[in-house]
Amino acid sequence: LHRVEAGTLVRNAASQAVLARAGFTRYGLAPRYLRIAGEWQDHVLFQRLADDPVV
């Protein structure tokens, strides 16, 4: 396993903080990533690589 990815809604600061504390790095923004309740939503993308330092 080389990479684990996660994404959150842009407005979900709590989930973004959890990912940051778990050692994930924000690496981008995915416009119109998922359709939720009939509307396209942007997502913040995070990753953690196998050789990232242990938190």
Image: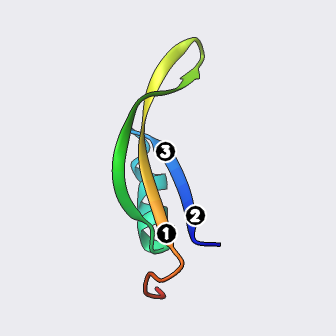
Q: Which residue is mark 2?
A: 4
Q: CA distance from mark 1 to mark 2?
A: 5 Å
Identify which amino acid the numbered label 1 is placed on: Arg
Identify which amino acid the numbered label 2 is placed on: Val
- How far across and how far down the image is residue 16, in percent? 43, 55
Q: State the residue lying farthest toward the front.
A: 2
Q: Earlier in the sequence, mark 1 or mark 2?
A: 2
Identify which amino acid the numbered label 3 is placed on: Thr
Tag 1 and tag 2, C-beta contact below 8 Å: yes
In the picture, measured across the screen, residue 38 lies left or right of residue 21, that is right
- How far across and how far down the image is residue 51, in percent? 48, 83
- How far across and how far down the image is residue 50, in percent? 54, 78
x 36%, y 58%: residue: 26
Q: State the residue lying farthest toward the right.
A: 1
Q: Which residue is mark 3?
A: 8
x 54%, y 53%: residue: 6
User: For the residue labelled by badge 3, is the local secondary structure a helix, a strand or a loop?
Assistant: strand
Q: CA distance from mark 3 to mark 1?
A: 15 Å
